[in-house]
Amino acid sequence: MYRDVKLAPAADKAKPAAIAITLFANTKTLPHAYAALDKAHAGILSAALERPDFSAGPNSILTLFSHAEKGVRIYILGLGEETKFDSQRLREAGAQVLTACLAARITSLSILTAAALGDRSSGAEAGRALGEGLGMANFQYEDQKGAAAARPDKSKAKPIDLTVRFEASLRAGAEAGLTIARATNITRHLIATPPNIANPAYIVSQARKLAAGAGLGFSVIDYKQAKKLGMGGLCAVGQAGSTPPAMICLQHKPAKARNKAPILLVGKAVTFDTGGYSLKINNGMLGMKYDKSGGMAVLGAMLAIARLKLPVNVVALIPTVENMIDQGSYRPDDIITMHNGVTVEVTNTDAEGRLILADALSYGCEKYKPAAVIDLATLTGGVVVALGSVCAGIFCTDSNLRSAMMDAAEQSGERIWHLPLWQEYRDMMKATHADILNSAPVREAHPIQGAAFLSYFLTDGATQMPTIPWAHVDIAGVAEAKGGSPHYRKGPTG
Ligand code: BES
Ligand code: ZN
Ligand code: ZN
Protein backbone atom coordinates (compact mmCIF):
# COMPACT_ATOMS: atom_id res chain seq x y z
CA MET A 1 0.00 0.00 0.00
CA TYR A 2 1.09 3.56 -0.62
CA ARG A 3 1.15 5.71 2.50
CA ASP A 4 -0.81 8.28 0.48
CA VAL A 5 -1.90 9.00 -3.08
CA LYS A 6 -1.81 12.71 -3.73
CA LEU A 7 -2.07 15.37 -6.37
CA ALA A 8 1.16 16.77 -7.85
CA PRO A 9 1.54 20.54 -7.33
CA ALA A 10 0.13 22.46 -10.32
CA ALA A 11 3.55 23.87 -11.24
CA ASP A 12 5.35 20.52 -10.98
CA LYS A 13 7.62 20.12 -14.02
CA ALA A 14 9.49 16.97 -12.96
CA LYS A 15 9.32 14.03 -15.37
CA PRO A 16 7.08 11.27 -14.01
CA ALA A 17 8.25 7.66 -13.92
CA ALA A 18 5.01 6.52 -15.49
CA ILE A 19 2.50 8.02 -17.89
CA ALA A 20 -1.02 6.66 -18.34
CA ILE A 21 -3.39 7.40 -21.20
CA THR A 22 -6.95 6.22 -21.66
CA LEU A 23 -8.48 4.93 -24.90
CA PHE A 24 -11.88 3.64 -25.95
CA ALA A 25 -12.05 0.16 -27.44
CA ASN A 26 -11.55 -0.14 -31.20
CA THR A 27 -9.63 3.13 -31.45
CA LYS A 28 -7.94 2.85 -34.83
CA THR A 29 -6.00 6.09 -34.87
CA LEU A 30 -4.30 7.72 -31.95
CA PRO A 31 -6.16 10.86 -30.75
CA HIS A 32 -4.29 13.95 -31.87
CA ALA A 33 -3.62 15.04 -28.27
CA TYR A 34 -1.40 11.99 -27.72
CA ALA A 35 0.74 12.67 -30.85
CA ALA A 36 3.48 14.58 -29.02
CA LEU A 37 3.76 11.85 -26.39
CA ASP A 38 3.90 9.20 -29.11
CA LYS A 39 6.65 11.11 -30.91
CA ALA A 40 8.69 11.62 -27.74
CA HIS A 41 8.64 7.86 -27.20
CA ALA A 42 9.56 6.82 -30.75
CA GLY A 43 6.05 5.93 -31.93
CA ILE A 44 5.45 3.34 -29.21
CA LEU A 45 1.73 4.20 -28.89
CA SER A 46 0.84 4.12 -32.58
CA ALA A 47 2.77 0.86 -32.92
CA ALA A 48 0.65 -0.66 -30.12
CA LEU A 49 -2.59 0.45 -31.82
CA GLU A 50 -1.54 -1.21 -35.05
CA ARG A 51 -1.22 -4.63 -33.44
CA PRO A 52 -4.12 -6.95 -34.29
CA ASP A 53 -4.47 -8.03 -30.65
CA PHE A 54 -4.78 -4.48 -29.29
CA SER A 55 -8.22 -3.94 -27.73
CA ALA A 56 -8.49 -1.25 -25.00
CA GLY A 57 -11.36 -3.32 -23.56
CA PRO A 58 -12.99 -2.31 -20.26
CA ASN A 59 -10.66 -2.75 -17.31
CA SER A 60 -7.65 -3.58 -19.47
CA ILE A 61 -4.19 -2.21 -18.82
CA LEU A 62 -1.28 -2.50 -21.23
CA THR A 63 2.25 -1.69 -20.04
CA LEU A 64 4.73 -0.31 -22.57
CA PHE A 65 8.40 0.30 -21.76
CA SER A 66 9.78 3.37 -23.48
CA HIS A 67 12.95 2.93 -25.50
CA ALA A 68 13.40 6.66 -25.87
CA GLU A 69 13.42 7.35 -22.15
CA LYS A 70 14.99 4.64 -20.05
CA GLY A 71 12.93 3.55 -17.06
CA VAL A 72 9.72 5.27 -18.18
CA ARG A 73 6.57 3.19 -18.50
CA ILE A 74 3.48 4.07 -20.44
CA TYR A 75 0.19 2.49 -19.45
CA ILE A 76 -2.73 2.29 -21.86
CA LEU A 77 -5.94 2.09 -19.83
CA GLY A 78 -8.87 0.60 -21.74
CA LEU A 79 -12.30 2.19 -21.26
CA GLY A 80 -14.27 -0.31 -23.33
CA GLU A 81 -16.79 0.73 -25.97
CA GLU A 82 -17.38 4.45 -26.22
CA THR A 83 -21.17 4.14 -26.46
CA LYS A 84 -21.28 2.13 -23.20
CA PHE A 85 -19.07 4.58 -21.30
CA ASP A 86 -19.90 5.77 -17.80
CA SER A 87 -17.78 7.07 -14.92
CA GLN A 88 -17.39 3.57 -13.51
CA ARG A 89 -14.96 2.77 -16.35
CA LEU A 90 -12.71 5.59 -15.12
CA ARG A 91 -12.91 4.41 -11.50
CA GLU A 92 -11.75 1.01 -12.65
CA ALA A 93 -9.03 2.52 -14.86
CA GLY A 94 -7.76 4.52 -11.88
CA ALA A 95 -7.74 1.38 -9.75
CA GLN A 96 -5.88 -0.62 -12.44
CA VAL A 97 -3.13 1.93 -12.85
CA LEU A 98 -2.70 2.32 -9.07
CA THR A 99 -2.25 -1.43 -8.75
CA ALA A 100 0.31 -1.51 -11.59
CA CYS A 101 2.25 1.45 -10.17
CA LEU A 102 2.30 -0.08 -6.71
CA ALA A 103 3.69 -3.38 -8.01
CA ALA A 104 6.52 -1.46 -9.70
CA ARG A 105 6.99 0.87 -6.69
CA ILE A 106 6.51 3.90 -8.92
CA THR A 107 6.20 7.19 -7.04
CA SER A 108 5.21 9.63 -9.80
CA LEU A 109 2.50 9.23 -12.40
CA SER A 110 0.97 11.48 -15.02
CA ILE A 111 -2.52 10.74 -16.38
CA LEU A 112 -3.80 12.00 -19.73
CA THR A 113 -7.45 11.40 -20.55
CA ALA A 114 -9.31 14.59 -21.48
CA ALA A 115 -8.68 14.31 -25.22
CA ALA A 116 -9.74 10.67 -25.45
CA LEU A 117 -12.95 11.33 -23.49
CA GLY A 118 -14.04 14.29 -25.62
CA ASP A 119 -17.50 15.32 -24.45
CA ARG A 120 -18.31 11.92 -22.92
CA SER A 121 -17.34 13.29 -19.50
CA SER A 122 -16.69 16.66 -17.90
CA GLY A 123 -13.28 17.31 -16.37
CA ALA A 124 -14.85 17.48 -12.91
CA GLU A 125 -16.62 14.14 -13.28
CA ALA A 126 -13.65 12.37 -14.91
CA GLY A 127 -11.20 13.73 -12.35
CA ARG A 128 -13.36 12.66 -9.46
CA ALA A 129 -13.88 9.14 -10.80
CA LEU A 130 -10.17 8.65 -11.50
CA GLY A 131 -9.26 10.04 -8.08
CA GLU A 132 -11.75 7.72 -6.41
CA GLY A 133 -10.48 4.72 -8.33
CA LEU A 134 -6.84 5.47 -7.53
CA GLY A 135 -7.59 6.06 -3.86
CA MET A 136 -9.96 3.13 -3.41
CA ALA A 137 -7.46 0.67 -4.89
CA ASN A 138 -4.95 1.83 -2.31
CA PHE A 139 -6.53 -0.12 0.53
CA GLN A 140 -5.51 -3.19 2.43
CA TYR A 141 -6.27 -4.12 6.02
CA GLU A 142 -2.92 -5.29 7.34
CA ASP A 143 -3.12 -4.50 11.04
CA GLN A 144 -3.59 -8.14 11.98
CA LYS A 145 -0.99 -9.71 9.69
CA GLY A 146 1.40 -11.66 11.85
CA ALA A 147 4.39 -13.94 11.78
CA ALA A 148 3.11 -16.03 8.87
CA ALA A 149 2.42 -13.09 6.55
CA ALA A 150 4.48 -13.03 3.37
CA ARG A 151 5.50 -9.40 3.32
CA PRO A 152 8.57 -7.37 4.19
CA ASP A 153 9.21 -6.41 7.78
CA LYS A 154 7.10 -3.30 8.40
CA SER A 155 9.85 -1.62 10.39
CA LYS A 156 12.38 -1.94 7.51
CA ALA A 157 10.20 -1.20 4.45
CA LYS A 158 10.07 2.55 3.86
CA PRO A 159 6.56 3.86 3.18
CA ILE A 160 6.19 5.50 -0.23
CA ASP A 161 3.69 7.97 -1.66
CA LEU A 162 2.31 8.18 -5.18
CA THR A 163 2.14 11.69 -6.64
CA VAL A 164 -0.23 12.00 -9.58
CA ARG A 165 -0.33 14.76 -12.16
CA PHE A 166 -3.65 15.39 -13.92
CA GLU A 167 -4.64 17.69 -16.75
CA ALA A 168 -5.74 21.12 -15.52
CA SER A 169 -9.43 20.46 -16.27
CA LEU A 170 -9.38 17.36 -14.05
CA ARG A 171 -7.38 18.66 -11.08
CA ALA A 172 -10.19 19.91 -8.84
CA GLY A 173 -12.28 16.80 -9.45
CA ALA A 174 -9.32 14.52 -8.81
CA GLU A 175 -8.53 16.27 -5.55
CA ALA A 176 -12.13 15.69 -4.41
CA GLY A 177 -12.02 12.08 -5.56
CA LEU A 178 -8.83 11.38 -3.61
CA THR A 179 -10.31 13.05 -0.52
CA ILE A 180 -13.46 10.92 -0.77
CA ALA A 181 -11.38 7.76 -1.24
CA ARG A 182 -9.22 8.53 1.82
CA ALA A 183 -12.37 8.88 3.94
CA THR A 184 -13.82 5.69 2.44
CA ASN A 185 -10.64 3.81 3.30
CA ILE A 186 -10.90 4.93 6.93
CA THR A 187 -14.44 3.53 6.87
CA ARG A 188 -13.20 0.26 5.35
CA HIS A 189 -10.41 0.00 7.90
CA LEU A 190 -12.82 0.39 10.82
CA ILE A 191 -15.26 -2.14 9.34
CA ALA A 192 -12.46 -4.69 8.82
CA THR A 193 -11.28 -4.30 12.42
CA PRO A 194 -12.43 -7.45 14.26
CA PRO A 195 -15.04 -7.40 17.04
CA ASN A 196 -12.59 -8.40 19.76
CA ILE A 197 -10.95 -4.99 19.18
CA ALA A 198 -13.69 -2.85 17.65
CA ASN A 199 -16.29 -2.85 20.42
CA PRO A 200 -18.58 0.16 21.00
CA ALA A 201 -16.03 1.91 23.25
CA TYR A 202 -13.36 1.52 20.57
CA ILE A 203 -15.66 2.95 17.88
CA VAL A 204 -16.41 5.95 20.11
CA SER A 205 -12.71 6.62 20.74
CA GLN A 206 -11.80 6.30 17.06
CA ALA A 207 -14.67 8.58 16.05
CA ARG A 208 -13.54 11.15 18.62
CA LYS A 209 -9.99 11.20 17.22
CA LEU A 210 -11.09 11.31 13.59
CA ALA A 211 -13.66 14.06 14.24
CA ALA A 212 -11.02 16.21 15.97
CA GLY A 213 -8.63 15.74 13.04
CA ALA A 214 -11.25 16.83 10.52
CA GLY A 215 -12.66 19.74 12.55
CA LEU A 216 -16.06 18.14 13.11
CA GLY A 217 -18.20 18.83 16.16
CA PHE A 218 -18.20 15.74 18.39
CA SER A 219 -20.20 14.59 21.38
CA VAL A 220 -21.32 11.27 22.74
CA ILE A 221 -24.43 10.13 24.58
CA ASP A 222 -23.27 7.43 26.96
CA TYR A 223 -25.35 4.59 28.42
CA LYS A 224 -26.39 6.60 31.48
CA GLN A 225 -27.50 9.59 29.44
CA ALA A 226 -29.23 7.34 26.91
CA LYS A 227 -31.24 5.79 29.76
CA LYS A 228 -32.20 9.28 30.98
CA LEU A 229 -33.20 10.35 27.46
CA GLY A 230 -35.48 7.31 27.20
CA MET A 231 -33.54 5.56 24.46
CA GLY A 232 -35.02 2.18 25.32
CA GLY A 233 -33.96 0.52 22.07
CA LEU A 234 -30.29 1.48 22.23
CA CYS A 235 -30.08 0.51 25.91
CA ALA A 236 -31.87 -2.82 25.52
CA VAL A 237 -29.85 -4.05 22.56
CA GLY A 238 -26.53 -2.92 23.98
CA GLN A 239 -26.94 -3.97 27.59
CA ALA A 240 -25.05 -7.28 27.24
CA GLY A 241 -22.25 -5.95 25.06
CA SER A 242 -18.61 -6.19 26.12
CA THR A 243 -18.70 -2.39 26.48
CA PRO A 244 -21.82 -0.24 26.99
CA PRO A 245 -23.87 1.15 24.10
CA ALA A 246 -23.40 4.75 22.99
CA MET A 247 -24.68 7.30 20.49
CA ILE A 248 -22.00 9.23 18.60
CA CYS A 249 -23.03 12.74 17.48
CA LEU A 250 -21.05 14.57 14.78
CA GLN A 251 -21.71 17.98 13.28
CA HIS A 252 -20.44 19.91 10.29
CA LYS A 253 -21.74 23.46 10.51
CA PRO A 254 -19.97 25.93 8.23
CA ALA A 255 -20.72 29.66 8.69
CA LYS A 256 -22.48 29.81 5.30
CA ALA A 257 -25.11 27.26 6.33
CA ARG A 258 -25.38 28.17 10.00
CA ASN A 259 -29.03 29.17 9.78
CA LYS A 260 -30.17 26.33 7.55
CA ALA A 261 -31.97 23.27 8.91
CA PRO A 262 -29.44 20.41 8.86
CA ILE A 263 -29.41 17.19 6.92
CA LEU A 264 -29.43 14.30 9.38
CA LEU A 265 -27.39 11.17 8.63
CA VAL A 266 -27.91 8.06 10.76
CA GLY A 267 -25.86 4.86 10.55
CA LYS A 268 -26.19 1.45 12.23
CA ALA A 269 -22.99 0.49 14.05
CA VAL A 270 -23.52 -2.95 15.58
CA THR A 271 -19.92 -3.99 16.26
CA PHE A 272 -20.99 -7.64 16.31
CA ASP A 273 -24.40 -9.21 15.79
CA THR A 274 -24.82 -12.65 17.35
CA GLY A 275 -28.59 -12.32 16.98
CA GLY A 276 -28.90 -12.26 20.77
CA TYR A 277 -31.23 -14.91 22.27
CA SER A 278 -32.78 -15.28 18.80
CA LEU A 279 -29.35 -16.65 17.99
CA LYS A 280 -28.10 -16.73 14.43
CA ILE A 281 -27.92 -20.28 13.04
CA ASN A 282 -25.77 -22.22 10.54
CA ASN A 283 -22.75 -19.97 11.06
CA GLY A 284 -24.84 -16.97 9.91
CA MET A 285 -22.96 -15.04 12.58
CA LEU A 286 -19.72 -15.19 10.62
CA GLY A 287 -19.06 -11.82 9.00
CA MET A 288 -21.23 -9.91 11.44
CA LYS A 289 -18.36 -7.51 12.18
CA TYR A 290 -19.69 -5.94 8.96
CA ASP A 291 -22.84 -4.98 10.86
CA LYS A 292 -21.19 -1.65 11.69
CA SER A 293 -20.89 -0.74 7.98
CA GLY A 294 -23.72 1.81 7.92
CA GLY A 295 -22.38 3.72 10.91
CA MET A 296 -18.81 3.66 9.64
CA ALA A 297 -19.99 4.85 6.20
CA VAL A 298 -21.73 7.78 7.89
CA LEU A 299 -18.55 8.55 9.83
CA GLY A 300 -16.53 8.44 6.59
CA ALA A 301 -19.08 10.64 4.83
CA MET A 302 -18.76 13.23 7.61
CA LEU A 303 -14.96 13.20 7.32
CA ALA A 304 -15.23 13.74 3.55
CA ILE A 305 -17.88 16.46 3.98
CA ALA A 306 -15.60 18.31 6.42
CA ARG A 307 -12.46 17.91 4.29
CA LEU A 308 -14.33 19.07 1.17
CA LYS A 309 -15.69 22.02 3.19
CA LEU A 310 -19.17 21.47 1.76
CA PRO A 311 -21.43 24.49 2.34
CA VAL A 312 -24.13 22.43 4.08
CA ASN A 313 -25.20 21.92 7.66
CA VAL A 314 -24.98 18.18 8.42
CA VAL A 315 -25.56 16.27 11.65
CA ALA A 316 -24.69 12.58 12.03
CA LEU A 317 -25.90 10.15 14.68
CA ILE A 318 -24.20 6.77 15.00
CA PRO A 319 -25.74 4.42 17.56
CA THR A 320 -23.22 1.74 18.45
CA VAL A 321 -23.83 -1.51 20.36
CA GLU A 322 -22.68 -5.12 20.50
CA ASN A 323 -25.60 -7.57 20.23
CA MET A 324 -24.55 -10.27 22.69
CA ILE A 325 -25.99 -12.73 25.21
CA ASP A 326 -25.71 -12.80 29.00
CA GLN A 327 -28.10 -12.88 31.94
CA GLY A 328 -28.75 -9.17 31.47
CA SER A 329 -29.49 -9.16 27.76
CA TYR A 330 -32.88 -8.30 26.32
CA ARG A 331 -35.04 -11.18 25.24
CA PRO A 332 -37.97 -12.03 22.99
CA ASP A 333 -41.28 -10.93 24.63
CA ASP A 334 -39.65 -7.90 26.29
CA ILE A 335 -41.60 -4.69 25.75
CA ILE A 336 -39.47 -1.58 25.37
CA THR A 337 -40.44 2.09 25.48
CA MET A 338 -38.54 3.99 22.84
CA HIS A 339 -37.29 7.61 22.79
CA ASN A 340 -40.50 8.94 21.19
CA GLY A 341 -42.76 6.98 23.55
CA VAL A 342 -43.70 4.27 21.05
CA THR A 343 -43.71 0.87 22.75
CA VAL A 344 -42.14 -2.12 20.99
CA GLU A 345 -42.69 -5.78 21.68
CA VAL A 346 -39.50 -7.66 20.89
CA THR A 347 -40.39 -10.67 18.77
CA ASN A 348 -36.83 -11.26 17.56
CA THR A 349 -33.63 -10.03 19.22
CA ASP A 350 -31.89 -10.40 15.85
CA ALA A 351 -33.94 -7.50 14.48
CA GLU A 352 -31.76 -5.23 16.63
CA GLY A 353 -30.58 -2.69 14.08
CA ARG A 354 -33.99 -1.07 13.75
CA LEU A 355 -34.21 -0.67 17.54
CA ILE A 356 -31.02 1.37 17.79
CA LEU A 357 -31.75 3.34 14.61
CA ALA A 358 -35.24 4.15 15.88
CA ASP A 359 -33.90 5.99 18.93
CA ALA A 360 -31.39 7.84 16.77
CA LEU A 361 -34.08 8.89 14.27
CA SER A 362 -36.45 10.04 16.99
CA TYR A 363 -33.80 11.91 18.97
CA GLY A 364 -32.32 13.45 15.80
CA CYS A 365 -35.69 14.68 14.49
CA GLU A 366 -36.63 16.16 17.86
CA LYS A 367 -33.32 17.82 18.65
CA TYR A 368 -32.14 19.04 15.24
CA LYS A 369 -35.40 19.56 13.27
CA PRO A 370 -33.66 18.36 10.11
CA ALA A 371 -34.70 19.29 6.57
CA ALA A 372 -34.07 15.71 5.44
CA VAL A 373 -33.00 12.41 6.99
CA ILE A 374 -30.93 9.61 5.43
CA ASP A 375 -30.10 6.39 7.25
CA LEU A 376 -27.72 3.62 6.21
CA ALA A 377 -27.89 0.14 7.70
CA THR A 378 -27.05 -3.51 7.09
CA LEU A 379 -30.61 -4.13 8.19
CA THR A 380 -31.90 -7.34 6.61
CA GLY A 381 -30.76 -10.55 5.00
CA GLY A 382 -33.97 -10.21 2.96
CA VAL A 383 -32.59 -7.33 0.92
CA VAL A 384 -29.70 -9.59 -0.11
CA VAL A 385 -32.20 -12.22 -1.23
CA ALA A 386 -34.13 -9.61 -3.21
CA LEU A 387 -31.34 -7.58 -4.81
CA GLY A 388 -28.14 -9.53 -4.34
CA SER A 389 -24.89 -7.64 -4.04
CA VAL A 390 -25.32 -5.45 -7.10
CA CYS A 391 -27.22 -2.61 -5.45
CA ALA A 392 -28.60 -1.40 -2.15
CA GLY A 393 -32.34 -1.09 -1.49
CA ILE A 394 -33.72 2.39 -0.88
CA PHE A 395 -37.03 3.33 0.69
CA CYS A 396 -38.10 6.93 0.23
CA THR A 397 -41.59 8.35 0.00
CA ASP A 398 -40.39 11.86 -0.90
CA SER A 399 -39.96 12.16 -4.65
CA ASN A 400 -37.43 15.05 -4.54
CA LEU A 401 -35.14 13.32 -2.09
CA ARG A 402 -35.54 10.06 -3.98
CA SER A 403 -34.43 11.55 -7.27
CA ALA A 404 -31.51 13.31 -5.55
CA MET A 405 -30.46 9.95 -4.11
CA MET A 406 -30.82 8.28 -7.53
CA ASP A 407 -28.65 10.98 -9.14
CA ALA A 408 -26.02 10.64 -6.41
CA ALA A 409 -25.97 6.86 -6.90
CA GLU A 410 -25.50 7.29 -10.64
CA GLN A 411 -22.66 9.80 -10.17
CA SER A 412 -20.85 7.73 -7.57
CA GLY A 413 -21.26 4.38 -9.31
CA GLU A 414 -22.92 2.99 -6.16
CA ARG A 415 -26.23 1.58 -7.31
CA ILE A 416 -29.49 1.75 -5.37
CA TRP A 417 -32.94 0.40 -6.26
CA HIS A 418 -36.22 1.77 -5.02
CA LEU A 419 -38.52 -0.49 -2.98
CA PRO A 420 -42.06 0.41 -1.81
CA LEU A 421 -43.26 1.61 1.57
CA TRP A 422 -47.04 1.86 1.96
CA GLN A 423 -49.41 2.02 4.93
CA GLU A 424 -50.17 -1.71 4.59
CA TYR A 425 -46.57 -2.45 5.57
CA ARG A 426 -46.83 -0.20 8.63
CA ASP A 427 -49.98 -2.10 9.60
CA MET A 428 -48.03 -5.38 9.46
CA MET A 429 -45.95 -4.17 12.41
CA LYS A 430 -48.94 -3.62 14.81
CA ALA A 431 -48.76 -5.49 18.13
CA THR A 432 -51.35 -6.82 20.59
CA HIS A 433 -49.68 -5.92 23.89
CA ALA A 434 -47.56 -2.99 22.72
CA ASP A 435 -47.79 -0.46 19.88
CA ILE A 436 -45.63 -2.32 17.39
CA LEU A 437 -43.47 -5.44 16.98
CA ASN A 438 -39.85 -5.32 15.92
CA SER A 439 -40.47 -8.17 13.48
CA ALA A 440 -43.82 -9.38 12.13
CA PRO A 441 -44.76 -13.06 12.61
CA VAL A 442 -44.56 -13.68 8.86
CA ARG A 443 -41.46 -14.10 6.73
CA GLU A 444 -42.87 -11.76 4.10
CA ALA A 445 -41.23 -8.54 2.93
CA HIS A 446 -38.47 -8.45 5.53
CA PRO A 447 -36.63 -5.43 4.11
CA ILE A 448 -39.91 -3.49 3.90
CA GLN A 449 -40.87 -4.51 7.45
CA GLY A 450 -37.59 -2.93 8.54
CA ALA A 451 -38.36 0.31 6.73
CA ALA A 452 -41.97 0.30 8.00
CA PHE A 453 -40.73 -0.14 11.57
CA LEU A 454 -38.34 2.80 11.24
CA SER A 455 -41.10 5.01 9.83
CA TYR A 456 -42.72 5.08 13.30
CA PHE A 457 -39.78 7.05 14.69
CA LEU A 458 -39.52 10.08 12.42
CA THR A 459 -41.28 13.40 12.99
CA ASP A 460 -45.05 12.67 13.02
CA GLY A 461 -44.32 9.02 12.11
CA ALA A 462 -45.73 7.49 15.30
CA THR A 463 -49.30 8.00 14.08
CA GLN A 464 -48.99 8.24 10.28
CA MET A 465 -46.59 7.74 7.38
CA PRO A 466 -43.94 10.37 8.13
CA THR A 467 -44.03 13.51 5.99
CA ILE A 468 -40.41 14.58 6.56
CA PRO A 469 -38.18 13.78 3.54
CA TRP A 470 -36.48 10.55 4.59
CA ALA A 471 -34.49 7.85 2.84
CA HIS A 472 -33.67 4.49 4.38
CA VAL A 473 -30.90 2.61 2.59
CA ASP A 474 -30.55 -1.11 3.36
CA ILE A 475 -26.91 -1.89 2.51
CA ALA A 476 -26.75 -5.50 3.77
CA GLY A 477 -25.97 -6.80 0.27
CA VAL A 478 -23.31 -4.27 -0.71
CA ALA A 479 -21.30 -3.80 2.48
CA GLU A 480 -18.90 -6.62 1.70
CA ALA A 481 -17.23 -7.25 -1.66
CA LYS A 482 -16.42 -10.79 -2.61
CA GLY A 483 -13.67 -9.46 -4.89
CA GLY A 484 -13.68 -9.16 -8.62
CA SER A 485 -13.71 -5.44 -9.36
CA PRO A 486 -10.46 -3.47 -9.39
CA HIS A 487 -11.46 -0.87 -6.83
CA TYR A 488 -13.48 -3.17 -4.57
CA ARG A 489 -11.13 -5.92 -3.58
CA LYS A 490 -12.34 -8.67 -1.26
CA GLY A 491 -13.44 -7.01 1.98
CA PRO A 492 -15.47 -4.00 3.07
CA THR A 493 -16.61 -1.67 0.26
CA GLY A 494 -17.01 1.34 2.55
N1 BES B 1 -27.39 -7.69 10.65
C1 BES B 1 -28.52 -8.44 10.23
C2 BES B 1 -28.78 -8.32 8.74
C3 BES B 1 -27.76 -8.94 7.82
C4 BES B 1 -27.92 -10.25 7.41
C5 BES B 1 -26.73 -8.20 7.32
C6 BES B 1 -27.01 -10.81 6.54
C7 BES B 1 -25.81 -8.77 6.45
C8 BES B 1 -25.96 -10.07 6.04
C9 BES B 1 -29.77 -7.98 10.96
O1 BES B 1 -29.59 -7.48 12.23
C10 BES B 1 -30.68 -9.17 11.06
O2 BES B 1 -30.29 -10.13 11.65
N2 BES B 1 -31.86 -9.08 10.47
C11 BES B 1 -32.81 -10.12 10.49
C12 BES B 1 -34.17 -9.48 10.63
C13 BES B 1 -35.26 -10.46 10.90
C14 BES B 1 -35.08 -11.12 12.23
C15 BES B 1 -36.57 -9.71 10.85
C16 BES B 1 -32.71 -10.91 9.21
O3 BES B 1 -32.45 -10.32 8.15
O4 BES B 1 -32.87 -12.12 9.25
ZN1 ZN C 1 -29.55 -8.99 13.72
ZN1 ZN D 1 -27.71 -6.61 12.61
Image (spheres, grey):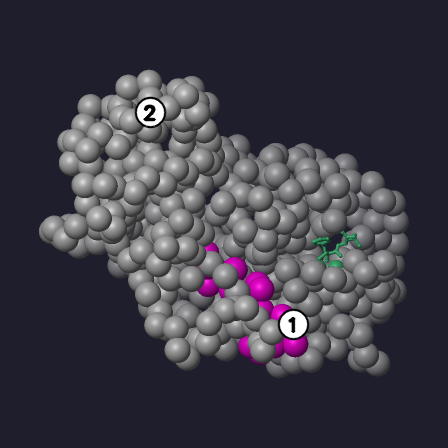
Q: Is residue 265 visible?
A: yes
Residue found at x 46% / y 31%: 58
* Amino acid carrying mark 2 in the image: Leu
Residue 216 as seen in the image, left or right of residue 116:
right
**Is 193 one of the magenta-colored residues?**
yes
The secondary structure that most of the magenta stretch takes on is helix
Residue 475, compared with residue 232, is above or below; it is: above
Q: Is mark 2 within 8 Å of ligand 1?
A: no
Q: Which residue is mark 1?
A: 195
Residue occupying image coordinates x 48% and y 47%: 487
On the rendered structure, is 461 left or right of 160?
right
Mark 2 and mark 1 residues within 8 Å of each other at the beta carbon: no
Q: Which residues are magenta?
A: 183-202
Among the two numbered marks 2 and 1 on one chain, the one whose residue lies closer to the N terminus: 2
Residue beneath disc 2:
49
Asked whether the viewer can see residue 91, the reply is no
Residue at 57% x, 38% y is 416
Query: Mark 1 is on which residue type?
Result: Pro
Tell which of 339 and 60 is nearer to you: 60
- Please tell me how crowded label 2 is: few (under 14), some (14-19), or many (20+) other residues with Cα within 10 Å: some
Decide which of 337, 325 is in the foreground and name it: 325
Element marked by disc 1: loop
Q: Work out how far the residue at label 2 is from the one at label 1, CA to CA, in angstroms.
A: 51 Å
Q: Nearer the viewer, mark 2 or mark 1?
A: 2
Q: Toward which corner of the image does residue 124 lie, by quadrant?
A: top left
Q: Is residue 60 shown above or below 368?
A: above
Q: Residue furthest front?
A: 67
